[in-house]
Structure formats: C-alpha cells, structure tokens
Image: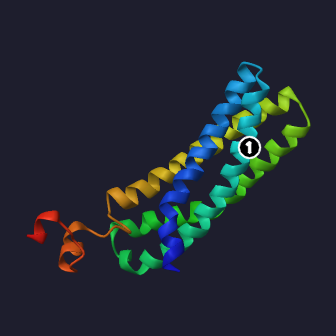
C-alpha cells in the first residue's frame, strides 16, 4: 500500500505537533487558570492521539516498502528501533488521551498536574521518535528518491529544457 506509505510524512508531522501543542495549551491553561486554553488543550490532545494512530498505520506501510532495501545497512537497526517504538506510541498516546478525557469531565488539580507530567513525557517520547525518523530520512536517505535517480528515470523537469 504505497499510497498509505506516502501519507506517513504529513500525518506524522501533525501527530507530533498536535501532542506537543496540546500539552503546551494545557500547561498554560493550568498556570494561568484559563479554561479556554485547557479546552484547546483537550481537543488538541484528543486529535493528537488519533493522529498518532494514523502515523503508526502509515509508518508500518512505509516500513514495509523500505525494509528489504535497508537490510545490511546502518539504517536497518535504526529502522527496526523506529518501528518498535512506533508500535507502542499509539497505545501510550491513547492512554494520555483517555486520561485527558477523564480530566475534561472531572476537574481535579492534583490529577491534572500528574497528567501534565505524563504529557511532557509523552511529548518527549514523540519528539524522540521524530528524531529517529529524521535520522532515517536525512542521514540515510530512507524513503527518499535522490535527485540523481530522478534524472536517470527522466522525472527531472527544468524550464530551460523546453528550448
């Protein structure tokens, strides 16, 4: 399912951003006792948890496409680590989302403080996972069609070539 694999980069960026921004909204809402910020944090965390599932599904498809190509290279172990972490993060994000859902209806400052600590940890985990994915792409070129490959296949287009 190459189509799903191609959706991995945009979906994963939403997942990372939504979780981190949701935690920031909730921290600011807690500090300033602002229910509007907490409400924004609630919806952002819920959407982020859903997006993490989308990132996992599309990431699995992307991994299936590149796994054979990277076997025996330095990227293989990193890809496996990225895959394993990507299998547990949706569950962790879901627990965070459920915790936040509970706190949306049951106001409790001590539990909200614990949620914020958990949220910071989860945001850090997601950031770490993003760092691994970034290394795969930017250091190893996993999943990237190089400029030279595009030229060789005749996919490179340049305006001056029309003359």
Q: Is residue 150 left or right of residue 89?
A: left
Q: 43 and 128: which one is in front?
A: 43
Work out which quarter of the rendered image holds the C terminus and state it.
bottom left
144, above or below 41, in the image: below
- Quadrant assignment, res 142: bottom left
User: What residue is disc 1 on?
Assistant: 43
Can residue 80 be seen at all in this image of the molecule? yes
81, above or below 73, in the image: above
Residue lying farthest right?
Answer: 106
Q: Residue at x 80, y 32 (%)?
A: 112
Q: Secondary structure at mark 1?
A: helix
160, above or below 101, in the image: below
Q: Position of residue 34 (x, y in %)?
A: 76, 23
Q: Position of residue 26 (x, y in %)?
A: 71, 32
Colouring scheme applied when the structure was drawn: rainbow
Residue lying farthest top?
Answer: 32
Q: Is residue 141 left or right of residue 55?
A: left
Q: Residue at x 71, y 37 (%)?
A: 41
Residue lying farthest left?
Answer: 163
- Quadrant assignment, res 27: top right
């Amino acid at each position: 399912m190459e189509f799903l694999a191609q959706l991995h980069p945009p979906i994963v960026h939403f997942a990372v951003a939504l979780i981190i921004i949701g935690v920031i909204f909730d921290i600011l809402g807690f500090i300033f006792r602002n229910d509007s910020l907490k409400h924004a944090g609630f919806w952002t965390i819920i959407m982020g948890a859903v997006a993490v599932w989308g990132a996992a599904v599309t990431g699995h498809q992307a991994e299936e496409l590149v796994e054979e190509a990277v076997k025996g290279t330095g990227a293989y172990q990193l890809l496996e680590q990225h895959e394993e972490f990507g299998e547990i993060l949706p569950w962790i994000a879901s627990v965070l989302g459920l915790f936040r859902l509970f706190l949306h209806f049951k106001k409790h400052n001590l539990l909200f403080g614990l949620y914020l600590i958990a949220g910071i940890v989860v945001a850090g985990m997601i950031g770490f996972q993003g760092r691994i994915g970034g290394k795969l792409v930017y250091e190893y070129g996993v999943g990237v069609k190089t400029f030279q490959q595009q030229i060789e296949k005749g996919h490179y287009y340049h305006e001056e070539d029309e003359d």
